Amino acid sequence: MTESLPDMHARDREGLARIFRYFGEVETPRLDSRVYTIYSLGVAEDAELLELASRIDPGQPPPNVLYAAVQDLLFQDPAGSPEAEALTVFYPAISGNAIPDRSPWEAFRAFCLGHAEQLDASLRTGRTQTCVVHRCAIVLPALASLPAIAAAEGRVALLEIGPSAGLNLRLDRYRYDYGEGVVWGDEAARPELCCDARGTQKPPVPEALEVVARCGVDLNPIDLGDAKAIRWLRALIWPEHVERARVMDEALALAESVPIEIEKGDATREIEAHIERLPADAPRVLFATHVVYQIPREGRRAMVEGIERASLERPVDLLIMESTGRGDSRIEWTHFEAGVRSQRRPLASCGPHGRWIEWGAR
């Protein structure tokens, strides 16, 4: 087993094999997916499936796009062929049943090779533009810890960088349970996000939270009225992650009654303008969850410079949740004021999908 990250842009046979082998040895076990572990280790040794994966955009992770393309096609016609019927049983979101205790490899391989033409368009254009609602369980305590929000009695104007479908901009309408009596939100609110609080410090929750603006900027925002785009969003959820699928469905149902504003744009060039459009009567907080790693270094620098300029008028707080490269993630707070970064510190370690948090851990 190797922990070294392969070149995710590689599309030659050897490079792709390394990507899928790494995915099956490291990533899928970390996120508890036996099905995708079997797929990944199998694809790594299969010349025909590696050729299929070579069609995927070099800017996208091949395993995620391949597996989403397969599930997306199954969603459309789960009984459309013998190969589809044989594979569908490994997808609880489609079958409604538990995953059988046998290998899905032969069914997966047969489906891919038998439907290569139908998969082609999704492979070439598919993006891993996920919207992991459970990450709100990490952002909520971070908001509760910000001095500016406390001073404003809970009022806040939010701007999300890379919000995808924007479900996380509605985080104040969800229910949270961190265990040991740490709960937040209306008892009847759905979805309910359960997050395991580890360590000695309990994660803070807001005494009050009033979101006065829900804004976002995304290169390719997802239209909730686009059935095809929402189907792809669901297809990006791994087979074993049944609760994540349920949470997304509940968040999508709520979205109809809580409006947000997402503009198509480039945060690396336009962030200052987006910040300046936020209301003037509430603290301005930007946040991003597993997005910044996709931005080249020059773009990240330009984005920070834009935030610094925006802070000349009024302070800006920035919350970033990103992978540490060690299998977990971390959320960090940066405060901008008078044109400079005046404070910066990590707030908590956490699971990449927001299923656990260790507040105060570095």
Image (spheres, rainbow, N blue to C red):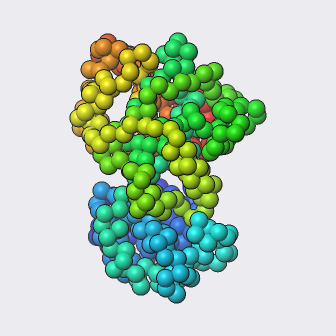
The image shows residue 352 at horizontal and vertical percentages of 53, 46
Q: Is residue 293 above or below residue 150?
A: below
| Side (left or right) of 338 relative to 231 | left
The image shows residue 152 at horizontal and vertical percentages of 51, 14
| Side (left or right) of 10 relative to 28 | left
| Side (left or right) of 292 relative to 345 | left
Q: Is residue 343 visible?
A: no
Residue ID at (56%, 82%): 86
Q: Is residue 224 above or below residue 22?
A: above
Q: Residue furthest bottom?
A: 82
Q: Is residue 255 above or below residue 19?
A: above
Q: Is residue 73 visible?
A: yes
Placement of the C terminus among the 4 image quadrants: top right
Residue ID at (55%, 19%): 154
The image shows residue 222 at horizontal and vertical percentages of 38, 50
Quadrant of res 21: bottom left
Report the number of discs: 0
Quadrant of res 60: bottom left
Q: Nearer the viewer, residue 341 or 84?
A: 84
Residue ID at (50%, 45%): 256
Q: Residue furthest right?
A: 180
Residue ID at (43%, 37%): 260
The image shows residue 138 at horizontal and vertical percentages of 56, 36
Q: Is residue 282 above or below residue 36?
A: above
Q: Nearer the viewer, residue 133 or 282?
A: 282
